[in-house]
Image: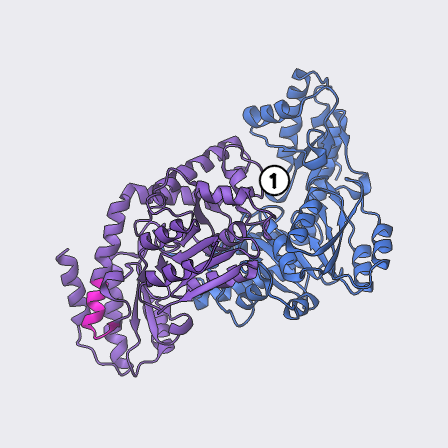
Chain colours: A blue, B purple
Amino acid sequence: MSNLIGYLDPDFLLILDEVSDLLKMVFQTEESLTLALSGTGSAGMEAGMTSLLEPDDTVVMCVYGFFCERMVEMAERVGANVVPLRAEWGRPFPTEMLENELKKHSRVKMVTAVHAETSTGLLQPLEDLSGLAREHDALFMVDAVTSLGGNEVAVDDWAIDYCYSATQKCLACPPGLSPVAISPRAREAIENRKKRPTSWYLDLGLIGNYWSDEHVYHHTAPVSMILALREGLRVVLEEGLEARYERHQRNAAALRAGLEALGMELVVPEEYRLAQITPVWIPEGLEDTPVRQTLLRDYGIEIGRGLGEFAGKVWRVGLMGESSKPEYILALLSALEEVLPRNGFEVAHGAGVGAASKALATT
Amino acid sequence: MSNLIGYLDPDFLLILDEVSDLLKMVFQTEESLTLALSGTGSAGMEAGMTSLLEPDDTVVMCVYGFFCERMVEMAERVGANVVPLRAEWGRPFPTEMLENELKKHSRVKMVTAVHAETSTGLLQPLEDLSGLAREHDALFMVDAVTSLGGNEVAVDDWAIDYCYSATQKCLACPPGLSPVAISPRAREAIENRKKRPTSWYLDLGLIGNYWSDEHVYHHTAPVSMILALREGLRVVLEEGLEARYERHQRNAAALRAGLEALGMELVVPEEYRLAQITPVWIPEGLEDTPVRQTLLRDYGIEIGRGLGEFAGKVWRVGLMGESSKPEYILALLSALEEVLPRNGFEVAHGAGVGAASKALATT
C-alpha cells in the first residue's frame, strides 16, 4: 500500500495551485479565486449562501426548477430575507420579472440563477440577469453544476460573482468536490461581513485562505479527490473547451432526433435546450418506474426520473462528459424500441436509431 | 474509461447498507444509525452542531485542545449558548469541572468531548463524562476522528449520542468522508427540532433518510469514496479491532522508548497517552521549522507541527492505520539521530533505534 501525500506537504500545495489555475481556464476567469470545496455541488451551493448572505440580507432568486428551489431552501435556512421569483419550469426565466422586483427594493445583496437546470433540461441565458444584478449593485450567484465543461461558462465576461459546479457532471470526475469561482467583489463582501457565517466547514473566507498563497490550514483536504480533479481537468483541456461544447451539442441533437422519431415530445423549446439532459414527457399510457427499471436491469442503462413538479411526468436522458457519445445514444434508442412496445406504446422499429444515425452523419 | 455506478442504483443502495453495517461493527453499536457524511471529519463535527443544537440551546463543552476549540467555534456560529470549560492541554479533563457546571443549569442540551485530541496526544476517558451528561438528560457528542479504528470506541456501552470520525486516520482510507453514529435519542432530538438546521448540506435528518431504508435522495453521494471506505472497513475488520488496537499500542510504546532515549520529553502523562500521535516538547535550542523541513525534504518523513497554544513548542509524531509499523519508527529515529546533532542537539548515536528495537522485541 502506498502512502498518500499530506495536505500541507509543499509538493501538494503546488498541486493545489495547479488545480486552481486549471479551474481558471475552465471557468474563463482571470479575476476570480478558483478552488475546489470538499463536498458535492450542494456544498458549493451552501458555501455561497452561508458566506455571502447574512441574516436579513435580501436575496432575489430566479426560480424555474428543482435545483432553484433547493437554493431557496438553503437561503431560508441561513435566515436571509428570501424573495423567490417563481416562473414556469422548462421555459427561460422572464427577465422583466427580475427587473420589476429589483425596482421594489432599496438594497438587494444578491441575485441567484441556475445556468443548466438539470430538472427541466433548460439552459438559462445569464447575461441579462447579470446585467440587472450589477445595475442594482447586487452580487450575482450562479449554479453551474451541470454546465461547467459542457457549456461555455464565462465568469469574467458575464460578471458572475460566485459560480459553483461539481466534478461528476461535465468534468467527468468522481463525485465529491465542488469547484467554485469567487470574484473580487464577492471576496470583499465576505471580508466585510458583520458576523461570521453560521457554517465553519463551508466558510469561503477560511477556505480561500487555504487555497490562496498563504495556504493557511483549515481542514484536511481530500487529497485523492483533488488529484483526480487535476487529471480530469487536464483531460477536459486536452479535448479543448470549444470541441467539448460542440461534442455535447452534436450528440444531444442526435438523441433529440431519435426520441422525436419514436414519437416522444421534448419538454424544452428548441432554443433553450440543454445538451447534457434531455427531458421528454412520458407518453400517455406508459408507466414511469417499470420502464426505467427495465432499462436499468435488462439493458444497463439508467435514465433519470422527474424531480419535483415533474415527478412521474418526465424522463430525463443524460449525456454529459464521458457519457456524451454516439454509442450510448444508439443503445438507448434501440432499447426503447424494444421496451416501449412491450409496455403498450407502439413505435416504428428502427425509427429512433435511424433518425439519430442520420443526424450524426450530417453533422 | 469505465463508468461509475449511480448513487440511486439499487446495487449501490445495497453497498450503502453494507457500509452502514460495517460501520456499526467499528463503532460497536447496534442501536445507532451509522453512515458516512460527504465531507471530512470537520463536516462530521459541523453536522452534529447544526443538527443537534438550536439557537439558545445550552451546550457545555469540555475543552483541552485545538480540536475542542474548533467545536466551540462551530457551536458559537450555530448561535447556541456555549459554555466552554477550559482545562489544561495534554492532561485529562477534570470530571468535577463538568459536574459542577452541569449543576448550575436547569437544562443542558448537549455535552461535548474529544476522544483522541490530536493536538496534544491525549486519549480522554469518556465514561464519566457520558454518565454526567446522561444524569442531566443532555446528549453526549464525541469527536472520534483519530480514535476510531485505533482505539476502542464503544458507542452503545459508553452511551454516546453522536459520534463522528474521519476516513484518513485509523481507518486508513483517503480523506473525504466522515463516518458517524447517531443514537435513537439524538435522532429523536433531530425530529423534535423547532426549526430546521441552518445547514441543508449537513442536516443529519435529511442525510439519515438517504442512508436509512427509504433511501430518499438528498445530494449526489461521493460514490467512489464510499466504495473505498467499504474496502477500508473490510481491511480493518480483517485485521480485527482488538489486534488493530494492540498494534497501535505496541508501536507507540516503541516510538516513545526511542524518543525518550534521544533525550526528548513526552507531553502527556503515561496513563493518558494516545498511541496514534506522540507529541514531544521541542528541546531547548532546536528550531521547529528547519528540523521538520529537513526530515520531509531529505528523509521523506513528515512530522506534525504544534497547533494552537502548542505552536512552536511541540512536534507531533503520527503512527496511525497503515503508518503504524516498526519500519517507520526506526526510520524516523535514525533520521533524528542524524538531524538533531547537526542542529546543535547532541544525541547518543544509535540510542533511539536501539531502545525502540528493544521495546519491539520484548512485546
Q: Which residue is at the front of the view, A255 or A133?
A: A133
To which chain does the residue with label 1 belong? A
**Does the magenta portion include B263?**
yes
Where is residue B280 drawn, in percent x and y? 29, 71
Vertical placement of A338 versus A24: above or below? above
Q: Residues within 10 Å of mark 1 (few under 14, many from 20)?
A: some
**Residue at figure coordinates x 16%, y 62% from the top left:** B357
Q: Is residue B140 visible?
A: yes
Where is residue B120 drawn, in percent x and y? 34, 66
**Residue at figure coordinates x 23%, y 58% from the top left:** B251
Q: Is residue B3 visible?
A: no
* Among the 4 quarters of the image, the one containing residue B350: bottom left
Per the image, the residue denoted by label 1 is A323
Vertical placement of A194 versus B199: above or below? below
Where is residue B142 drawn, in percent x and y? 40, 53
Using residue A168 as the reference point, say whether residue B19 is left or right of it.
Answer: left
Span shown in magenta: B254-265
Using residue A249 as the reference point, say whether residue A5 is left or right of it.
Answer: left
Magenta stretch, main secondary structure class: helix
**Residue at figure coordinates x 63%, y 58% from the top left:** A50
**Does the magenta portion include A206?**
no
Using residue B222 as the reference point, say whether residue B347 is left or right of it.
Answer: left
Using residue A342 as the reference point, say whether residue B81 is left or right of it.
Answer: left
Q: Which residue is at the front of the view, A358 or A182?
A: A182
* Among the 4 quarters of the image, the one containing residue B311: bottom left
Where is residue B158 drawn, in percent x and y? 34, 47
Q: Which residue is at the front of the view, B209 or A251?
A: B209
Residue flagged by tag 1: what amino acid is it? Ser
Query: Which quarter of the rendered picture does the C terminus of chain A lie within?
Result: top right
Q: Which residue is at the front of the view, A1 or A111?
A: A111
